[in-house]
Amino acid sequence: MAFAADPPHTHGTLTKFFGVSADFCYKIPDSLHTREGILLEPLAVAVHAIRLADVRPGHRLVVFGAGTVGLFCAVVAREFGASTVISVDLLPGKLDVARKLVGAEVSRSWVPNSSYTAEENAQDLMETYELEDGADIVIDATGAESSVQTAMCILQPGGTYVQVGMGKRNIQFPIAEICERELSVKGSYRYGTGDFELAMSLVQRERIKFDGLITGEFSFEQASEAWESTRRGDGVKNVIKGPGD
Ligand SMILES: NC(=O)c1ccc[n+]([C@@H]2O[C@H](COP(=O)([O-])OP(=O)(O)OC[C@H]3O[C@@H](n4cnc5c(N)ncnc54)[C@H](O)[C@@H]3O)[C@@H](O)[C@H]2O)c1
Ligand SMILES: OC[C@H](O)C(O)[C@@H](O)CO
């Protein structure tokens, strides 16, 4: 898969014109403003992950990370029938967005304690939400070592773990947990056939609404400020306009 947004295959999409074959394009639904169209990409990432996780009605999920990808994993899981989705993030503001997007009936939130071990955090989360044997499915959308370690300790026997977050290439990984509880561990990378279609359909049918998710708009000249704002974790999604827009 050649990814358009960053080198080496291209110089990136931060340009006035970007040529791409028509059969690699999807028409943004008329109901969406172009700037909201950028959210279809991370939504397709989430659709891919939730399909791989095989979320079924009644499942209880934990999603580490409430950035764009984690938020969308949580709301797509709701659409697949999850009864409870616990969003985990260090930033309480991100969890407020998750609650609004997913809805109070399904959404729960939890902030890890940075001075706890992974096992202590896992125990705290499971007690808080009465997950006696553990969650059915856990998704990591942070790439953070501490999240991955905690995630492994909150799955029920036979549960499924999906790695979406991409952080350090090598981390300490509690491999015994996989063996002893017969966990299924999967990696999720970008998207596959049908993921963009389902993402667009969820938006067109207004099952998922993008209202309030574009929290910053920057001119081309302010691009570095946009990246800095994203690095600080401000808001949800920043848009950088093309040159001359
Ligand atoms: N697998 C793929 O195809 C794919 C596609 C897109 C993004 N990604 C990866 O997914 C991850 C999420 O992407 P995003 O765009 O939502 O990023 P983001 O930076 O917007 O979100 C990450 C969130 O994780 C939270 N976080 C960081 N460390 C944490 C910790 N220790 N505990 C709890 N929360 C923590 C942050 O506060 C933030 O809200 C990134 O690692 C990104 O590289 C992977
Ligand atoms: O949504 C697609 C992602 O941005 C990526 O796959 C990227 O972060 C890794 O190269």
Image (tube, rainbow, N blue to C red):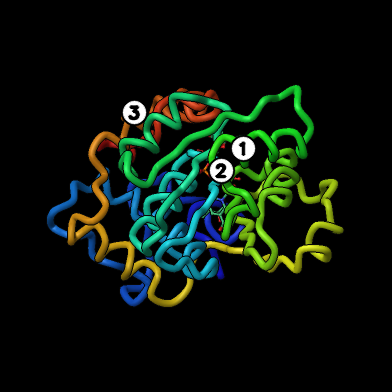
Identity of the amino acid at label 3?
Gly
Identity of the amino acid at label 2?
Glu
Q: Position of residue 137 (x, y in %)?
A: 57, 59
Q: SS at mark 1? A: helix
Q: Quadrant of residue 114?
A: top right
- How many residues crowd around disc 1 within 10 Å: few (fewer than 14), some, or many (20 or more)? few
Q: Are marks 1 and 2 in contact (CB under 8 Å)?
A: yes
| The N terminus sits in image quarter | bottom right
Identify the disc placed on residue 127: 1
Instruction: Find disc 2 in the rendering and name its residue.
Output: 130
Q: Quadrant of residue 93?
A: top left
Q: Residue at x 32, y 39 (%)?
A: 104
Whether residue 199 sits left or right of residue 154 in the image: it is left
Identify the disc placed on residue 183: none
Q: CA distance from mark 1 to mark 2?
A: 5 Å
- How many residues crowd around disc 3 within 10 Å: few (fewer than 14), some, or many (20 or more)? some
Instruction: Find disc 3 in the rendering and name its residue.
Output: 216
Marks 1 and 3, the one that precedes in the sequence: 1
Q: Position of residue 31 (x, y in %)?
A: 13, 54
**Which of label 2 and label 3 is nearer to you?**
2
Which of 180 and 233 lies nearest the eye of the viewer? 180
Q: Residue at x 37, y 72 (%)?
A: 24
Whether residue 33 sits left or right of residue 181 in the image: it is left
Q: Residue at x 45, y 30 (%)?
A: 94
